[in-house]
Amino acid sequence: MVETNLKIVKNLTNADIDEKEIQKAFENNLDTIEEGLKYIGSFIPIGTGVIDPLALDDENNPVIIEFKKQGKFDEGALIQVMNYYSWFKSDENHFLYIKDIAKKSGFENIGNNLGLIIVLSDVRDDVKNACWALEPNIKIVEYFLSRDSKGEIQIVPKVVIDTSVGGEREIKTPKTEEEHFKGKESLRPIYEALIKEIKEKIDMKIKPNPAPQDYIALTNRNNFCGIHVKSKFLRLDLLLAPEDINDNNNPKRLIGHTWNDEWSFVRVSSKNEIDEELLKWIKVAYDKAS
């Protein structure tokens, strides 16, 4: 699919844009998601939630679309649309309810297949792979925000998964520590100092797992820390919800995570930043994962 820019609003920062504005922009340009999509309505209540927008595809089959603003967790979006799908599959009268809504909007000859589309800013490889194992056809559209020469915010969408047209899950071999630090060797001493401090002050049994593609995992039964090797710093994703850090006296250092409210992240760009405050947060995440 060719990438197409959608205009949102003028003179706003990215942080000012909420989920409803992104949804409205897409609803006015449904062809950027899938050619032939026809808008029926938004915020339609069903027995297990509220459908963001409901549409019809080019064969008049109902399509549920779920939007997420930047930073929302993609796994939750997939679970949400599958929950909707399960509700429709559990009782044929539930599907008749949607058909009736479409007919009241002036559409006839409604099809019997239900499509699912998720629109979000970022999706992990494991979530993409999970889509191929599910019964319904699923399309995932990623987008990013940009600003044009006039200062206006644009959305650039791109289809990254469409199980209706065939394909296969992407299998990647596990990464090594050396691969994570390739071209970023200057960060290796900071990483080694961090692991040394964690082992000495939290748990000597902790062993970093570099196998994931995007991060090095630290685990205590469950993952409590993901170390992302960036170009100029290490980003530590910690299993910390807001209530876990309400005594934090340096809120600018610990930032909300891009997955969901259960995670936060902190950047470490020098050995000096591996201090008692950081180790305290890591210990809280470690205990929470046990």
Image (cartoon, grey):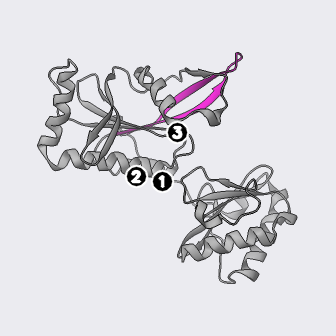
Q: Where in the figure is residue 213, as x and y percent of width and height?
A: 60, 56
Label 2: element kind: helix
| Residue 239 visible in the displayed image | no
Contact (CB < 8 A) between labels 3 and 2?
Answer: no
Q: Where in the figure is residue 139, as x and y percent of width and height?
A: 39, 37
164 is higher (above) or lower (below) than 81: above
Residues in magenta, as a range: 138-162
Amino acid at circle 2: Ala
| Residue 234 visible in the displayed image | yes
Contact (CB < 8 A) between labels 2 and 1?
Answer: yes
Task: Name the side, left or right, on which 267 lies relative to 210.
Answer: right
Q: Which residue is mark 2?
A: 130
Earlier residue among tags 3 and 2: 3
282 is higher (above) or lower (below) than 141: below
Label 1: element kind: helix
Q: CA distance from mark 3 to mark 1?
A: 20 Å
Earlier residue among tags 3 and 1: 3
Numbered badge on residue 69: 3
Most common SS among magenta residues: strand
